[in-house]
Image: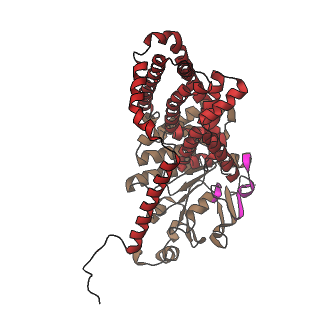
Chain colours: A red, B brown
Amino acid sequence: MSAHPRTWQRFTRAERLARFSVYLAVVLAVGWAVHSVEIIVEFIWDAPEQIADMGRRMWPVAWWFYPKGVHDALVETLNIAAVATLLGILMAVPVGFLAARNATPSRLLNNLARLILVSTRSISTLLWALFFVAVFGPGALAGTLAIAFHSIGFIGKLFSEAVEDAHRGGIEALTAAGASKLALIQYAYWPQVKPAFWGIALFRWDINVRESAVLGLVGAGGLGMALDTAINLFQWDRVALVLATIFAVVIVAEFVVTEIRKRII
Amino acid sequence: MTSALSIRNLVKEYVPGKPVLTGITLDIAGADITAVIGPSGTGKSTLIRCINRLVEPTAGEIIFEGRDLVRLAGNELRAARSRIGMVFQEYNLVERLTVMENLLTGCLGRMPAWKALLRRFDPEDIARAWETLETVGLTDFANARADSLSGGQRQRVGISRAVMQRPALLLADEPTSSLDPKTSVEIMELLAQVAATKSIPVIINMHDVELARRFARRIIGMSGGGVVYDGAPAGLDDAILKRIYGGESWLH
């Protein structure tokens, strides 16, 4: 029978060693990262001055320019976001159902659908935009398709997870009553995933408004195009106007989405 | 009378070589309740679910309306399923649909796809749904969402949905196990009433031996995946209960 030891330590020697190696690895990784981005110290010291200078050029904001050069671009941005979200949903929902293991009991189709979801999502909107600008020329169509295709992965993944979370009970009961696959989706799955669906759709629209504001930088229409023009012409007061507009739109979209979600969920 | 359902040498193995059902042969007929009793894990639920193929049988035949259910697939299977109503322990309603919608989903099995898609339910089915709701005393809840109901009310919706199928056979998988004793009796009375008024056989698998004795005309006792008793409730004495459940201290 051994007496209780008098000392107590939170970690064993091996654990302490393991923790120390993790810390060391983190420090080394950060050091390596900082070294490889080659920060030029002069630029950092210079930064406050540059920022102040840009601030001076941006002020006063060219509010007068809004009706002339920004309003139409803003409407275009909102339209791109809305149409792209709708298109994205149309393409993503079937893929989402195919990816859900309970709704589609075929491993092959599940994996195929998941491949579509992962690949559309892993290509960023900007890359999609470059591709569609090359295909359809610059403009709103390219921007819309870019956002729609990038949205497939996001909407489809979250939607398929919602489908997989559906309670089996109602689905089982309708199967037992002889309902067809389509009727099962409509009457057993859909009522259950509907709240999640609207949440996802609204959230994605919110993201797409922001995305479409930037896409113009690669010539895909909307506010980004106005931003790009203003930057290229060094019209910093107009740049400030576009930025303020984007900021306002994002705030309003956030507010609208929150309010709608509150009401439907 | 010819039997509505005849099961021949039904075997189910979830894991190969370990049968849960070891060759069950049964004939079900009449217009009353047949209770399947037995300890947990003895395959009662599996037996019920093999009949409408919610569980795939490994071997055997299940003859219903002149066809072997085990061999059916696709639309034929759906058509056969639509003739077999099922009531579940956890009610299995679509929680976010209304009571009326839940009842009408019982008709989906025999509706053409386009009518289902457009929710064009037969006016006759809708009239029947109202009648059914009246018999179960839920007329006022027709437009209430299923998840707002109590357990007993939900089970009555579950039974109504099965009745809406115009079934030739009704299966019930532990329909009273989630309910209090009083509600359990009411649900059993309702199931007995369905059997009598629609003149169809009702197969209920249940835990409560007393409730089975009280409502069933025939009791099937299962143990170890096989049938060890098949007969009237009166013949269910202590010796047989011991054979079904094992042990005896619980009997006294």
Q: In this rendering, is residue B219 above or below B76?
A: below
Outermost residue, front direction?
Answer: A42
Which corner quadrant holds the C terminus of chain B?
Answer: bottom left
Residue at horizontal 51 percent and vertical 14 percent from the top: A71
- Give, as a single range, the part of the protein colored magenta: B50-74
With A9 as the anchor, is B69 left or right in this view? right
With B15 as the anchor, is B235 left or right in this view? left
- Which quarter of the figure has residue B219? bottom right
A115 within the magenta span? no
Q: Position of residue A128 (x, y in %)?
A: 64, 33
Which corner quadrant holds the N terminus of chain B?
Answer: bottom right
With B17 as the anchor, is B197 left or right in this view? left
Q: Position of residue A188 (x, y in %)?
A: 57, 42
Residue at horizontal 48 percent and vertical 62 percent from the top: B212
Q: Position of residue B8 (x, y in %)?
A: 70, 65
Residue at horizontal 50 percent and vertical 69 percent from the top: B39
Is residue B82 among the parts visible in the rendering?
Answer: no
Outermost residue, bottom direction?
Answer: A1
Q: How many marks?
A: 0
Q: In this rendering, is residue A119 above or below A72?
A: below
Q: Depth check: A173 or B162 in front?
A: A173
Q: Depth check: A72 or A88 in front?
A: A72
With B227 as the anchor, is B9 left or right in this view? right
Is residue A15 among the parts visible in the rendering?
Answer: yes
Residue at horizontal 64 percent and vertical 21 percent from the top: A139
Q: Depth check: A21 or B213 in front?
A: A21
Q: In this rendering, is residue A47 above or below B201?
A: above
Q: Depth check: B88 or B170 in front?
A: B88
Q: Position of residue B156 (x, y in %)?
A: 47, 45
